[in-house]
Amino acid sequence: MIDWTCISTVFLDMDGTLLDLQFDNHFWLEHVPMRFGEKHSTSLEQARKEIYAQYRSVEGTLAWYSVDYWSRQLELDISALKQEMTHLISVHPHVVNFLCSVAGTGKRLVLLTNAHIKSVDIKLAKTELDQYFDRIIVSHDLGEPKESVRFWPLLKEYEPHEPARTLLVDDNLSILRMARQHGIAHLLAVKRPDTQGLEVDSEEFEAIGDFSEILPN
């Protein structure tokens, strides 16, 4: 699936790609509405209705991914609520073996995530995946999410790379399309970002079931 002789840089998404999206889905769709309902003495159904509408209003923007934004917006300590659920944070199968193998080839390995730094810190403290990366980049540092047309030119300056020799693995098809538009030549989706959910349709992109399928030789 990947000719590793053609790859110099590897960009890897975090949530849904390296980590099981079960944590985020449960946290944002179940745990946050529950705590919001408790705080405001409203039913879980009403809390979900109100919060889901707020989610949709900023989806695809930096605010959507910002712990600080949602802490202010919902008047909840989102970081503290995430700490309550760290037992659900888990690494997808064969990720550690893959990271070790890629690191051993001398290729540049970069974590490229839309997640807010507070979320990144919580998840890396639990998984210890940071030890394998040459660099960790959160999109908030560039002021644009990965879905934005402005993100990729900014990334080129922030983290120099040859698009034709770069691999991106991401579970978000909109991000893969934007990366392709900016010349990233090697693109892979993820078949099951949430292990408790169904396989997703990767449409025009090749997709992996797990990272054992693309281990460097």
Image (cartoon, rainbow, N blue to C red):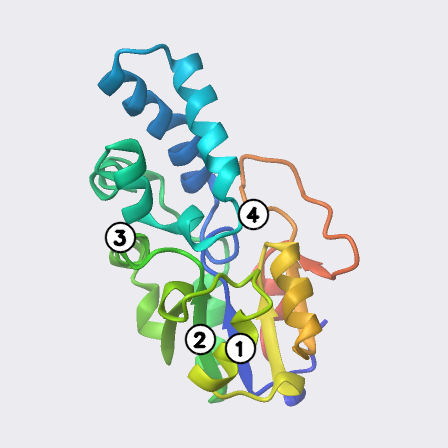
Q: State yes or no: discs 4 and 1 in contact (Cβ < 8 Å).
A: no
- Can residue 217 be seen from the camera position used here? no
Alpha carbon of mark 3 to alpha carbon of mark 1: how far?
Answer: 23 Å
Q: State yes or no: discs 1 and 2 in contact (Cβ < 8 Å).
A: yes
Q: Secondary structure at mark 4?
A: loop
The residue wearing badge 1 is 10
Alpha carbon of mark 4 to alpha carbon of mark 1: how far?
Answer: 19 Å
Q: How many residues crowd mark 2 within 10 Å: few (<14), some (14–19), many (20+)? A: many
Query: In the figure, 125 relative to 161: above or below?
Result: above
Q: State yes or no: discs 2 and 4 in contact (Cβ < 8 Å).
A: no
Question: x and y percent of residue 27 in the render?
Answer: 38, 35
Residue 122, label in figure: 3
Alpha carbon of mark 2 to alpha carbon of mark 4: how far?
Answer: 19 Å
The residue wearing badge 2 is 110
Q: Earlier in the sequence, mark 2 or mark 3?
A: 2
Q: State yes or no: discs 3 and 4 in contact (Cβ < 8 Å).
A: no
Q: Earlier in the sequence, mark 3 or mark 1?
A: 1
The residue wearing badge 4 is 193
Q: Secondary structure at mark 2?
A: strand
Alpha carbon of mark 3 to alpha carbon of mark 4: how far?
Answer: 19 Å
Please give the name of the residue rendered at 35% of the width and 39% of the height, measured from the top-left corner: 88
Q: How many marks?
A: 4
Question: x and y percent of residue 131 in the render?
Answer: 31, 72
Q: Where, by quadrant of the figure, is residue 31 drawn?
A: top left
Q: Where, by quadrant of the figure, is residue 158 drawn?
A: bottom left
Question: What kind of residue is marked 4?
Answer: Pro
Question: x and y percent of residue 118 in the render?
Answer: 27, 54
